[in-house]
Amino acid sequence: MSGGGYDVVVDVDEEGDLGHTDLQEDLEFHSSNFDDGQNRHKIAPDQAGFLPPPASAPSGGSSKRFLWTLSFYAQFFDVDTTTVLQRCAAAVYPRANFLDVMDGNPDLYGPFWIATTVVVILFLTGTISQYLSMKGEEHFAYDFKLLSGAAGLIYGYTGVIPIALWAVLKWFGSESANLLECWALYGYANMIWIPVALISWSPVTILNWVFTAIGFGLSSLFLFRNL
């Protein structure tokens, strides 16, 4: 018999009685191992998440993120306006390595809106340039091919070139290559194209090419400095 967490061993004689009424002298108590046997077969729950938490998330929590959930993409936009403005300023006036400025928390918020701003400005300045060149005609029609062309150029450059760069770095055995950092680096490098797009609507073609060459040179210098 057992009770209270102990195994009870009773010394019984040949006639079937206890032989003594003082059970304390004849009983031997052993520690029960029933609970240990049950706990031995229990499997501890898995506490590791599918994806690591973002840099701003508390280290003690864990959460699973899947491609079809908004939380998976929200972690790439985990920055505030002040941080984005600081990174934009660091891209225009580079004084330190931009990877150090990002401090291990690259984002896609700044690159997305910077690229979108460049697309809109290119469409507007291109439309203004066409309007000035066609001034005097009865009807002016907007050329939305400019918008699709600018979107394809800027979004393609910002989205595809970093993937190619990341693949090349991985091919040569770089262990620190990070696709998100490459996207962020190329995205913030587009900051220089905002002023270039604003002043490149001049009807003087050679002047527009000069502005474009300056923008290309500054953008390339920023990328080579931080790669």
Image (cartoon, grey):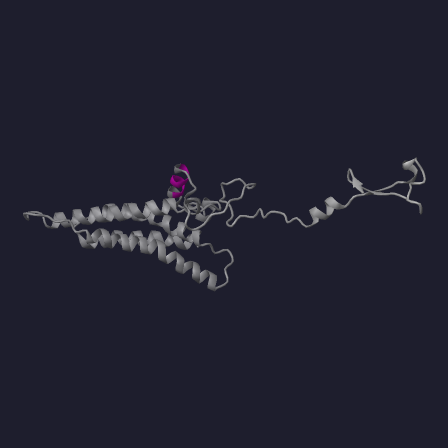
Q: Nearer the viewer, residue 57 or 8?
A: 8
The number of callouts visible is: 0
| Residue drawn 48% across the image and 64% down it | 172
Please give the name of the residue rendered at 35% of the width and 52% of the height, measured from the top-left corner: 219
The span shown in magenta is 82-87
Q: Residue 49, image x and y in percent?
A: 53, 48
Near-viewer residue (56 or 115): 56
Q: Is residue 18 visible?
A: yes
Q: Is residue 5 left or right of residue 158?
A: right
x, y percentage for residue 187? 36, 50
Residue nearer the viewer, 6 or 80: 6
The C terminus lies in quadrant: bottom left
What secondary structure prevails in the magenta region?
helix
Q: Is residue 31 magenta?
A: no
| Rendered location of residue 79, percent (x, y) | 42, 40
Q: Is residue 2 above or below residue 146?
A: above
Q: Nearer the viewer, residue 194 or 146?
A: 146
